[in-house]
Amino acid sequence: MCNVCGCGSGETRIEGEGRGPAYRWAPVARRRAVQPEAAPAEPPPSEGDDGAVHFGHGPAGAHAPGMSQARMVSIERDILARNDDFAADNRRWLAGRGILALNLVSSPGSGKTSLLVRTIAALQAMPQAVPVSVVEGDQQTSFDAERIRATGAPALQINTGKGCHLDAQMVGRALTRLAPSEGSVLLVENVGNLVCPAAFDLGEAAKVVVLSVTEGEDKPLKYPDMFAAASLMLINKIDLLPHLSFDMDKTIDFALRVNPRLQVIPLSATSGEGFDAWLAWLLARREEARAGVSAPAEPEARC
């Protein structure tokens, strides 16, 4: 079980590697039951001025029945420290080849895949085509990877089972399989979730959070960790604005309250409006990655 985000038993499968799981968490029933007398004391949930009951207060910022805040903090540190080691390996591997890696995060239905398809087409149509490869993260199916491969770009599907995010070890294995070319762009489409992927560094240059106008203005305040971790917010589906009561200024204000350094680009993956600004941002980051090429590290075994 991942104590950081709460995803429980399940398995992750990387496309093309057979039916065996790449990672497995023991089902809850297999874990040794904690005897009632051994259960740690839990602080009661607090009630805010608004009357809401808050389970996210305390050092861990979360609640797990039968587990103390101190134990939760300890487990989270262990999990994230191990993930950060894999992320550092990924970052060195990418830096040695001048590859720009972006981690696209959002809730389900924001239009990430459509955004990627249009982005890939635009990069391929440039006078000097920009090579792109994609890692697709979903709980099940290869639908999104198939959409990406239809553009001609290589894509690898990672199905996380009951897991709710990609982690750095998964992406490290994907790098070995995809073998993106030097100076290319690697786009990682994370599992649709505005909570858990915020905590996991994949070795990317930046997190790009995609928010569609159909989701409402309040998402940055409801899910602040994701917007705090992101470098860029793409507000997608602006072609639908005439049919909605979405307040663009309020959304941007809420996001900047959480992260004053957040850059914002409104666009439409359908009409193409605002796409020039997104491509300019992406290409500028790519040039930074290519300019900062370090000596390539020797390939490491990725288990």
Image: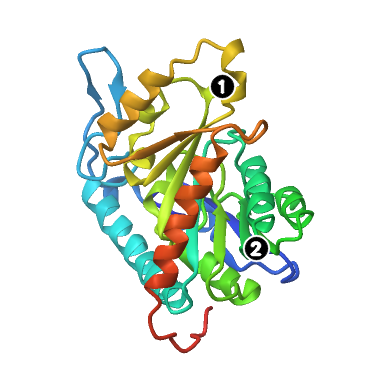
Identified at 79% across, 54% down, the residue is 150
Q: Against 33, is 300 above or below?
A: below
Q: Against 47, is 137 above or below?
A: below
On residue 214, the disc is 1
Three-letter amino acid code at the position of disc 1: Thr
The image shows residue 262 at horizontal and vertical percentages of 33, 40
Q: Against 48, is 209 above or below?
A: below
On residue 129, the disc is 2
Q: Residue at the front extreme?
A: 127
Report, in whole angstroms, how far the alpha carbon at label 1 lies from the one at label 2: 33 Å
Q: Is residue 84 left or right of residue 142?
A: left
Secondary structure category for the residue under label 1: helix
Three-letter amino acid code at the position of disc 2: Ala
Q: Earlier in the sequence, mark 1 or mark 2?
A: 2
Q: Nearer the viewer, residue 60 or 68?
A: 60
Visible residue check, residue 127: yes
Identified at 54% across, 34% down, the residue is 274
Q: Which of label 1 and label 2 is nearer to you? A: 2
Identified at 25% across, 45% down, the residue is 60
Q: Quadrant of residue 133?
A: bottom right
